[in-house]
DNA sequence: GTGGATGAG
DNA sequence: CGCTCATCCAC
């Protein structure tokens, strides 16, 4: 207690108001309190928390298996360990040890392999010998995504709906902006700051908070700038931080009670400091970095530990200034930093090492893209092998799309892209996902296969060391389907599932001409069917079989069906199939020559194609047609915007929402235009 | 709009 | 390490 006049130059309050000042004054004003209430990034009272699950994957497995939290546990991925719980870390294990090393150092350790998708499986699963089957399986992180969702839901359910601001930062991290909630609690607890400012002047300083020593709970660790001011002289920022730490402690308790996960947390005035704080003491504890502790706390770090300085930029800074510590950087004038790093980056760095970070907690929980990938140990060497993986990628992505609410038309990805790596170089291709129709596994597969073909066509593709498929450009809302639905021939949507009808309606006429099988499938397959069917094989009751997309790994069955062709009227006879063009053996690696009755000549590209690859080859042309020109199913003109005009579409999606004065990643968005590298702006 | 790079977990 | 995810930039 004791001091009264703010010793801080930054505090305008005492100097500005000549009014009666017999009482102790806060460093903060009523205006500050107001900005605090709506989580303004510039509020000096702002309170941000970062919550980080401890060895998350390992905890997930521990919980799933019902193990005691004390048993040493690691999560295995092929021959490596990707997560190690704290009991196991006590044995000196870290992420780079091998399985055998781990078991030597810690014989008791349990190494649980991650879940995997296996070719032909309908779902990911846990398998004890997954690690032996790297050639036919790909890992699935679904179990962890699911747990992440539960955690997020728990947090959101616990925090007051009207005041929460939650950002999912990664699969095991969240940021909370607790400002609004803490503001509310502060007013409840301290009547003296409730009223309007004296003289109605927002620049009036607040009264000082009660001088009682703050009761930082046992698990809230406090780092101080100077040991002197230990407990006296708390101001409202300290009170705010204290309240926030209570909230975070409760959140953590809730997560533990409900889901049995422990986590570490950091609290401070901004995201950068909160994140450093959460890593400061692990596991299962929380660290508060008060305003008055910031300089000391931050100066103890190498700046390469700060977000965005962990890579090339950090290296550049180290090289330019010959140091890797925050404290050595502090004396460097901002102009100097800007001269070498560019205006924006220089200014950003100048601020960040002073503990200033005005980036917002973005309430976005939704993902913007999703990707499924695999590195090939022995490389894969042909189109067929790649297609098998595409099947798996599609199944993986599709199931995640379902989780995202794509079926319910809540959100839908706009583009699909495929990345391919061979040798040093990686190439990729992307294309739009046709709008206005249901997204199906078969449709995605067709597009993916098309993209792969494109990659294969222009350059050496084999051996391929890595393949990935992703969808992105998610859009909200239901646009699209209604118009089309009403145009369809009713009575054919038999299989519509308990989901919005419009989403699953079949495209009109059953009588398709050759080739329409693929297109129809693409545009209208009941999605549930796809969800539950196996990767390589869409199930085969009447209509589904009809609409089936022949996958490369199931040619014989398909062929048989085609051969007997007449069994279904809507199935065009083989002869009627559209034929094709294409690229010969880059797409079709197998030597087509010899034996004339096992090959045919594509009418579209004049290539000779082995019979077994004919269907696939034709699919390729269809997919190509689909994505290049305009193959539009019957429908009302208005409903098919996407086909004709690309340019006009631009406006549509983004609408007016994007790009406003969004702060750059560096904080204050506006700063002069950066020259050198606006890596983030 | 596409493809590559960077960064982080 | 292997696998995701996000953002930015040049084209």
Image (tube, coloured by chain):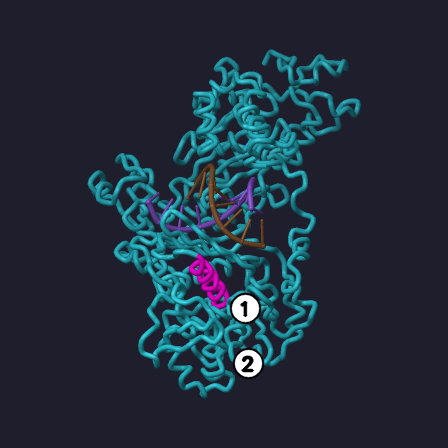
Chain colours: A cyan, B brown, C purple
* Prevailing secondary structure class for the magenta stretch in the rendered image: helix
Determine the residue positioned at 68% across, 57% down. A648
Q: Which residues are magenta?
A: A442-458
* Residue A160 screen position, x and y as percent: 60, 43
Determine the residue positioned at 33% across, 60% down. A381
* Residue A671 screen position, x and y as percent: 65, 30
Q: Secondary structure at mark 1?
A: helix
Question: Is residue A579 or residue A402 the one in the foreground?
Answer: A579
Residue at the disc numbered 2 = A512
Question: Is residue A154 or residue A680 the one in the foreground?
Answer: A680
Residue at the disc numbered 1 = A625
- Chain ID of residue with mark 1: A
In the rendered view, tell whether residue A407 sits above or below residue A467. below
Badge 2: residue crowd in 10 Å (few <14, some 14–19, many ≥20): some
Q: Quadrant of the N terminus of chain A?
A: top right
Determine the residue positioned at 33% across, 58% down. A380
In the rendered view, tell whether residue A509 sits above or below residue A166. below
Question: Is residue A353 or residue A675 the one in the foreground?
Answer: A675
Q: Quadrant of the C terminus of chain A?
A: top right
Which image quadrant is residue A135 in? Answer: bottom left
Badge 1: residue crowd in 10 Å (few <14, some 14–19, many ≥20): some
């Amino acid at each position: 207690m004791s001091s009264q006049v703010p010793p801080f130059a930054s505090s305008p309050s005492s100097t500005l108001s000549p009014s009666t000042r017999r009482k102790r004054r806060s460093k903060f004003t009523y205006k500050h309190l107001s900005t605090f209430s709506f989580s303004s990034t510039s509020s000096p009272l702002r309170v941000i928390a970062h919550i980080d699950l401890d060895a998350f994957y390992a905890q997930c497995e521990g919980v799933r298996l019902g193990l005691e939290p004390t048993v040493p546990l690691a999560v295995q991925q092929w021959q490596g360990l990707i997560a190690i719980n704290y009991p196991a870390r006590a044995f000196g294990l870290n992420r780079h040890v091998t399985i055998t090393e781990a078991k030597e150092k810690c014989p008791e350790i349990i190494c649980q392999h991650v879940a995997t998708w296996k070719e032909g499986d309908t779902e990911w699963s846990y398998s004890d010998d997954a690690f032996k089957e790297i050639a036919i399986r790909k890992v699935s992180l679904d179990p962890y995504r699911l747990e992440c969702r539960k955690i997020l839901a728990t947090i959101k359910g616990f925090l007051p709906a009207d005041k929460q601001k939650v950002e999912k930062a990664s699969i095991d991290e969240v940021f909370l902006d607790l400002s609004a909630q803490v503001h509310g609690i502060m007013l409840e607890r301290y009547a003296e700051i409730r009223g309007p400012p004296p003289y109605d002047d927002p620049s009036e300083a607040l009264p000082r908070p009660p001088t009682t020593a703050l009761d930082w709970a046992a698990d809230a660790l406090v780092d101080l700038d100077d040991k002197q001011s230990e407990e006296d002289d708390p101001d409202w920022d300290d009170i705010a931080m204290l309240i926030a730490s209570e909230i975070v402690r409760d959140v953590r308790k809730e997560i533990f009670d409900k889901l049995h996960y422990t986590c570490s947390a950091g609290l401070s005035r901004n995201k950068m400091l909160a994140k450093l704080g959460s890593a400061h003491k692990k596991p299962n504890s929380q660290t508060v970095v008060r305003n008055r502790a910031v300089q000391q706390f931050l100066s103890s770090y190498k700046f390469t530990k700060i977000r965005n300085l962990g890579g090339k930029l950090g290296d550049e800074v180290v090289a330019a200034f010959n140091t890797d510590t925050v404290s050595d950087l502090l004396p460097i004038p901002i102009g100097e930093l800007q001269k070498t790093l560019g205006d924006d980056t220089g200014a950003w760095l100048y601020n960040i090492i002073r503990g200033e970070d005005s980036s917002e907690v973005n309430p976005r929980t939704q993902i913007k893209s999703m990707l499924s990938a695999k590195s090939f140990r022995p490389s894969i060497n042909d189109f067929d092998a790649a297609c098998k993986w595409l099947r798996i990628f599609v199944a993986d992505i599709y199931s995640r799309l379902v989780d995202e609410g794509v079926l319910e038309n809540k959100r839908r990805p706009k583009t699909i892209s495929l990345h391919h790596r061979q040798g040093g170089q990686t190439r990729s291709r992307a294309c739009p996902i046709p709008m206005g129709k249901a997204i199906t596994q078969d449709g995605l597969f067709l597009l993916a296969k098309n993209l792969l073909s494109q990659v294969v066509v222009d350059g050496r593709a084999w051996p391929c060391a890595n393949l990935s498929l992703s969808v992105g450009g998610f859009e909200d809302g239901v646009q699209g389907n209604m118009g089309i639905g009403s145009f369809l021939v009713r009575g054919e949507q038999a299989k519509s599932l308990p989901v919005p009808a419009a989403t699953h309606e079949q495209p009109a006429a059953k009588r398709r001409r050759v080739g329409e099988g693929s297109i129809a499938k693409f545009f209208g397959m009941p999605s549930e069917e796809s969800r539950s069917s196996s990767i390589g094989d869409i199930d085969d009751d009447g209509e589904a079989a009809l609409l089936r997309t022949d996958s490369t790994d199931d040619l014989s069955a398909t062929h048989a069906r085609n051969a007997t062709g007449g069994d279904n009227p809507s199935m065009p006879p083989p002869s009627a199939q559209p034929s094709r063009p294409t690229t010969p053996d880059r797409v079709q690696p197998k030597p087509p020559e010899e034996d004339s009755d096992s090959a045919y000549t594509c009418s579209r590209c004049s290539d000779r194609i082995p019979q077994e690859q004919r269907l696939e080859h034709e699919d390729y042309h269809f997919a190509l047609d689909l994505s290049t020109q305009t193959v539009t199913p019957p429908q009302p003109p208005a409903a098919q915007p996407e086909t004709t005009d690309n340019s006009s579409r631009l406006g549509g999606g983004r609408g007016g929402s994007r790009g406003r004065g969004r702060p750059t990643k560096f904080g204050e968005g506006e700063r002069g235009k950066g020259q050198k590298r606006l890596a983030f702006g």
